[in-house]
Image (cartoon, rainbow, N blue to C red):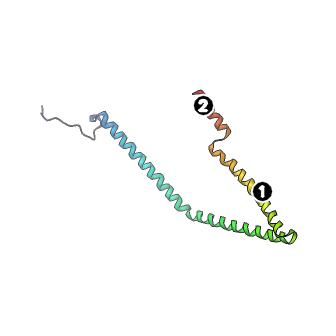
Amino acid sequence: MDARVQTPRADDPADASIGDLFHQLVDDGRAFVTAETNLYKQIATYRVGKAKNGIVALVAGGLLAYAALIAFLVGLVMGLADLIGPVLGGLVVLAVSGGVAFLLIRYGVDKMSALGGDAEEKAALRRGEQRA
């Protein structure tokens, strides 16, 4: 018999202790999560890079549409100024465009409330909490 004590090899799982195996499991899990995170970052960066020109075009188009709407409203006020006067024409355009804006904002706020969950989802959550 050999008097030397043999130390377990690190690459042989049969000779590793449970603590070593858990340590290896944690390290492998950390490496996996890091790799997945880096993958999703690269995918997002790639997609943003591809969509950058589209975003710029959408913003420019939105600004031009906004400018066109302002020009239309000014033209409408000037056209009504000949018929009912400049102040009353401005008030009519303000009332109509303000009413449309109010309705659009109310509609948008109602739709945004869905981010907190709709009534059916909230009822299901309440039922689930009552069972627990």
- Is residue 78 depicted above or below 38 in this figure? below
Q: Amino acid at mark 1?
A: Gly
Which residue was labeled with disc 1?
99
As measured in the structure, the alpha-carbon distance from the residue carrying label 2 to the one carrying label 1 is 42 Å
Say which of 117 and 21 sits in front: 117
Q: Nearer the viewer, mark 2 or mark 1?
A: 1
Residue 19 lies, in percent from the top left, at 31, 35
Residue 121 lies, in percent from the top left, at 64, 38
- State the SS at label 2: helix
Task: Name the residue at the top extreme.
Answer: 131
Question: In which quadrant of the rendered view does residue 56 lie?
Answer: bottom right
Mark drawn on residue 128: 2
Q: Residue at x 66, y 41 (%)?
A: 118
- Is residue 75 depicted above or below 27 in this figure? below
Say which of 61 and 92 sits in front: 92
Q: Are marks 2 and 1 in contact (CB under 8 Å)?
A: no
Q: Amino acid at mark 2?
A: Gly
Residue 116 lies, in percent from the top left, at 62, 43
Q: Residue at x 86, y 72 (%)?
A: 82
Say which of 65 and 49 sits in front: 65
Task: Name the residue at the right extreme.
Answer: 83
Q: Residue at x 76, y 59 (%)?
A: 98
